[in-house]
Image (spheres, rainbow, N blue to C red):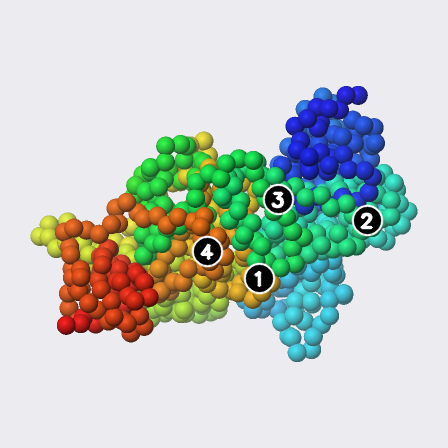
Amino acid sequence: MNVSHLLDTLNQAQREAVTAPPGHVLVLAGAGTGKTKVLIHRIAWLLATKQARAYNILAVTFTNKAAREMRTRLESLLNDSSQNLWANTFHSIAHLLLRKHWQLAHLPQTFQILDSDDQLSVLKQVIRNLELDDKVLTPKQAQHFINTGKDYGLRAKEMVAEESDVWRNQMLNIYTAYEARCQQTGLVDFAELLLRCYELWRDNPSLLTYYQQRFQYILVDEFQDTNTVQYNWLQLLAGHSSQLFVVGDDDQSIYSFRNASAANLAHFNQEFPQVQLIRLEQNYRSTGTILEVANTLIACNEQRLGKNLWTQASAGEPIFLYTAYSELDEARFVAEKVQAWSGQRREMAILYRTTAQSRLFEEEFLQRGIPYRIYGSLRFYERLEIKDMLAYLRLLHHRDDDGAFERIVNTPKRGIGERTLETLRGIARQKEISLWQAAKQAIETQELKARASSTLTTFLDLIEQLNEQVKPLPLHEKIKQIKTHTGLVAHYQKESKEEAQRRLENLDELVNAARQFEQRRSNLPPTDDTENPLTVDTLTEFLAHTALEAGEGQGNEWEDCVQLMTLHAAKGLEFEVVFLCGLEENLFPHQNSLDESKLAEERRLCYVGITRARRYLYLCHSESRYRYGNREFATPSRFIREMPTELIQAVRLSNSTVSPLRSWMSSSKGKLHRGERVKHNQFGEGVVLNYEGQGDYARVQIKFASGNKWLMMAYAQLEKLR
């Protein structure tokens, strides 16, 4: 059979990987180097050269979409059906094996798979049966604890109890009871699929031998994303005779929060005999400049297997660096560049470290009528924690808001159940009153049981007390107080660490949103117009603003929309234009990831972001940013300093140049004019050169002996010199 068509389109390194001789092969494939093509052509090569039958090949991917694409492209390459080829995800393969060998796996033939929500329901029952407080030991915490244990290949009995760690010991009790419950009722969660399949092979040597003899060629995509049980699963199946062909990139290992291990690639290279290491370094996506910046940045990480991306394409444009004076200015800059782009909007992506950062871009795009989509997440005002907080604000503002009442009456959990709510709904319908009024009436007329009446009274008292407490406070302080005194923080902290962090960051961003809304509102010019918004209280106006923002739906999938997403969600995607935003210390790298091992993953995350760009890459950071409702100085990210400066070009927003109409600015000592001499506590004496912005966002450029510097007027504390 002529196989030249399988090799003609490959470069030298790709051809070397596809035609590698028998043995274990590790393909270290950089971003945009055609790793999926290599994996598919390797399978096609094995089949076309008669080295293997489809029956002897196992191809493992991480998504169903990737598995479907693999089978489709194989059929196209070979003009033959891939029906006998096992090409699927870890979970799908494990499920198939457990169905075939249910007795050996100690499962009923009709075992049921639990999705995440079903697993939580079972855990709620288990915790209740153990007579534990599910407000302290929450189902979500238990779910995370159990799934993490299984990802590391550990049963409850294999996890060590610690006398001093009461929480851990209680979690182990829940894990033990949960295992018994699932075994008794024939339930299998997602993490259990892999662990049970590993144990199936481990505990049944003859069955393992059968599959080792069958699957003589095992190919694995995205190997850097494997966890411990997946690695052990592959190692057990490969045994001493099967040949493993794994494709991965240690520089793109960014999912440690899912228990993926970047070390698995290094372990593979060390633990399997005579591994042939092949590097795919020729990039077909990005310009030479983008690749050089990415290479220089990632070289700062230690313990890499090492590679250097290159391209035959031109160097292209420089990397553009925009220094914003505030996060609002950053959003305006990005929006202006989007509007100026003559290509399709779907070819532009705004990438950020945390989901909370999307809000300002969303608001700016809505104001300008720019269609956008949040990829892999909800829009800011649609997120659960934001809707919870807004419901508290709505009920404080208007007690007869039934939607708000229903949302928060038992958030956080207060023991107010569905039966109590049904009683209140019945009273409200009969009397044609609100749920708030129905609750007060039910308590007064003793229509509820004592316990229900007591918990409901506590809730009503909380709202009334909170109202008195926050009434004189500005809007953003109202939100801070609600967050603290309602128990919402503790409520969200009962979720997994990453989920809790995300929710609390979004609530902090809502505080910032309220603070900025107050400032915009206070800057409105005075007018005698009876419809002046200042005649409406701030809370009413803010709630209307959030409702309108939430009501503006994001673009549909078929529309030409700008893409907004976190850096984690961007992996595997590519765009003509990429804006990498929020490049500031404690934001990116994140404040929780500054120790050495976590910092290396943050740097890999930045590398992933850079290598999403094909032609244009914008790096954005802000000199100041609202945090927890207060404006703070922001330090540029160390990642910017780790990039080659000669490849970076600073840019300015076209409409943020110095205004000729205002040649002065206010300082704590009066008005400043261009050319005046001033003194700064740190930088010493200098001369005023330029000015831009207004109010809290105003900044001044001053020529000091150490060089020109832009300073925020709100913090500079400049002294005029005579």
Residue in the image at 79% along x and 29% along y: 47
Neighbourhood count class around disc 1 (C-alpha, 10 Å): few under 14, some 14–19, many 20 upward: some
Neighbourhood count class around disc 4 (C-alpha, 10 Å): few under 14, some 14–19, many 20 upward: some
Neighbourhood count class around disc 3 (C-alpha, 10 Å): few under 14, some 14–19, many 20 upward: many
Q: Which mark is residue 598?
A: 1
The residue to which callout 2 is attached is: 274
The amino acid sitting under disc 3 is: Gly
The residue to which callout 3 is attached is: 30
Determine the image quadrant of residue 160: bottom right
CA–CA distance between discs 2 and 4?
39 Å
The amino acid sitting under disc 2 is: Gln
Q: Disc 1 vs disc 4: Cβ atoms closer than 8 Å?
A: no
Residue in the image at 74% along x and 61% along y: 155
Label 3: state its secondary structure: loop
Q: Which mark is residue 640?
A: 4
Neighbourhood count class around disc 2 (C-alpha, 10 Å): few under 14, some 14–19, many 20 upward: few
Give whichever of discs 2 and 4 has the lower sequence position: 2
| Location of residue 283 in the rendering, given as x and y in whole percent from the top left corner | 58, 39
